[in-house]
Amino acid sequence: MEVRPRKSMEVVTLVVERSVLIVDRSEETREVLSTALERHGVRTFSAGRAQHGLELARQLHPDLIVLDLELDDELDGSTGEAIAPFAQESAVQETPMVLLGSVRRSAARLPGGEFVRKPYHYGPLIRRIEELLGNRAEIT
Amino acid sequence: MPSLFGIRGSDQGARFELEDPATRLGRDSSNAIQLHDTEASRQHAEIRCVDNVCTISDLNSSNGTFVNGEQVRQHRLASGDQVQLGSTLMLFTCPSDQSEEDLARVIDIASPQQTDDQSQIIHSVTQEEGSRIFEFGTDAPQDSWLARARSNLQVMYRTALAVSHTLDIDQLLQRIMELIFEWVEADRGCVMLVSPESGAVEPKVRRTRKGIRPDEKIPISKTILDFVMEKNEGVLTSDARQDDRWNPAGSILRSGIREAICVPMQGRYDVVGVIYIDTSTSPQEVIQKGGTTKFTEDHLKLMIAIAHQAALAVEDTRYYSAMVQAERLAAVGQTIATLSHHIKNILQGIRGGSYLIEMGLAEEDQSVVRRGWKIVEKNQNKISALVMDMLTFSKEREPDLGPADMNQVIGDVLELMQSRAGELNVQLHCHPADEMPTLVFDSEGIHRAVLNVMTNAIDAAGEKEEPGRVDVRTEYSADEGVVSVTIEDDGPGILADEKEDLFKPFISSKRGRGTGLGLPVSQKILNEHGGRILVESTSGQGSRFTLQLPAVVAESSSQTKVN
């Protein structure tokens, strides 16, 4: 039996595509974040409402979720009602989160998330998301 | 049912219903109402009731039966009468036998046409005249007990009036001092209040009689002041040197006060201050007038009563202003919270747009620059609208009147709103009036007013899953001289409890998305034009806002423009 050497062409490099789910009420924020992240080779999905965001999270298992803490139109989201579904959802328990809000206590329901205070600058936010994605790639 | 209510004696607090035609009262247990009173006779009195008409008869009791302090053998009782048997005092009450619904039937406001109303007004008294009830007539007895009582009543009545008519504490105390000076021969007087902050007693108002130098110091003994404040008792010092209570401090000695009255201002909860008056009589005067004093115990008693009234008013005023202040602070806080939330969102938008522009420039990607610019521009419009709304709302302004075409104004607004409507999947339909002359109005203001109402309509219509619809209609009525703009949406409608707050500033039903300025601004602009906004809304079917204003046809072009 002749053993043929493997052609180098056949070596398949697996490019792991990283994905981020953006759940934010503001269409502008979604547009800016997705445009910027896509440039860095990150795949993005966005939702404007909590329920839609949750469905996407269950289906797509993103590597990171950017979550607006003021989803329910409440002035400062301090009751945390808007993000309650995310706190109860097992599918996202292990997913790193970046929480965008005005008051820190609105993030209390998701203690594992990283709080970023509004109004934020996009440069540092994008870099932080990159870092969190990088860390995750090393672990997995 | 008629009843007796014990207000003094062993049976205080007990209530006895007079349900039988005849009820006996006495110490003996055989009585229907047994009195636990050794001063009452075994069988003291009897009350007979026929159709709520009650008559009390004394049963030859040893100590007698009294109604309103007068001894009676037999007496027909009226509601509110005080019945005394022995040392037991009871209040008789007899409810009227008419229920409330009967009242409308039995009270008939007769119109002048009705012949059975023969009444004529024979005398009427104005509020002003009524307030002179305690003033003396010329026939009033001088220097009698009655005259003094009337005088006291008058002072109290005027005090009550004074304290009920002002909410400014200084003014109120000034008035009280004036009243006191009108009525008592004082040389100097002042009111001191306990500062709510420091707890220190601070002079608030001072007054001196004519002839006394107004800049003369009023020496007030600290000893008296402390006594009045601590014991909560009014004091009258007719001659300080003979009063042992003040001896140790001896400050009165030096100041030479002969007579003074100092009373606590006792409110509901605390002593809020003191009122002090004094007068000095020179030795010559004492000899001339035979040593009579100017201040009496009557003065002291009345001063205590006046001070109590004043204290109640001070407490009320403080409570009221604290409440107003708290409400104002809360309103300011709410306003700032709403505005800063809104401005923060705009700022976030501008930062996002700028970030895209920066990225586009770095990568030389025109399309990204354009997308960024679009976001910046949108937010620029938002902040400009917010500033305009704030300016419109913040001050009284005159509308900038000029000839303009209402249909044109509405057309401009519609054009501006197209993109927002498109985003929310809402169809805009315009129905301009066929006949619309050039009118005189503040076109920029009305533009703003319509824009705000339309923004709400589009937001409301866009809330539904299915496509929404907003209809805008202009109408002109030459006969009524009215022009109106109607904006109708097919959104969820306005909830009943939201209707009340519709035009209140900084209250938005859109929560974080609205500034709460839109409708108040629209209403203000319409009001400036002498117009109004009418709101009709059906829950689940939508809302209709009609902006109505007087149509002033421009002089130069009264001809009708046909669209």
Image: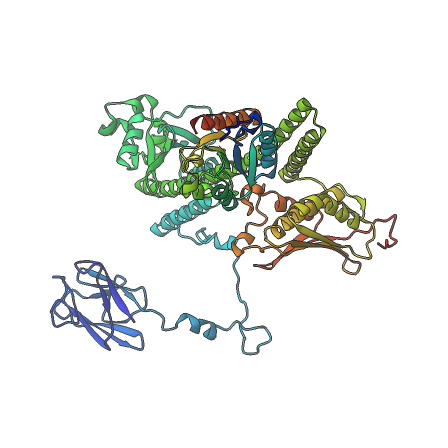
Vertical arrangement, residue B246 with respect to residue B94, above or below: above
Q: How many numbered discs sit on the rendered protein?
A: 0
The x and y percentages for residue B253 are 30, 23
The x and y percentages for residue B74 are 24, 72
Left or right position of A34 against B291 = right
Q: Quadrant of residue B267?
A: top left
Left or right position of B116 against A96 = right
The x and y percentages for residue A100 are 50, 33
Q: Quadrant of residue B399?
A: top right
Left or right position of B403 against A50 = right
Instruction: Please identify the quadrant where the N terminus of chain B is shown.
Output: bottom left
Left or right position of B408 against B515 = right
Q: Which of B154 and B192 is in front in this view?
A: B192
Instruction: Pick out the residue farthest to the top.
Output: B254
Residue B528: tell me if it is visible.
no
Q: Nearer the viewer, residue B363 or B530?
A: B363
Q: Which of A23 and B192 is in front in this view?
A: A23
Instruction: Please identify the quadrant where the C terminus of chain B is shown.
Output: bottom right
The x and y percentages for residue B315 are 39, 40
Residue B513: tell me if it is visible.
yes
The type of colouring in the image is rainbow
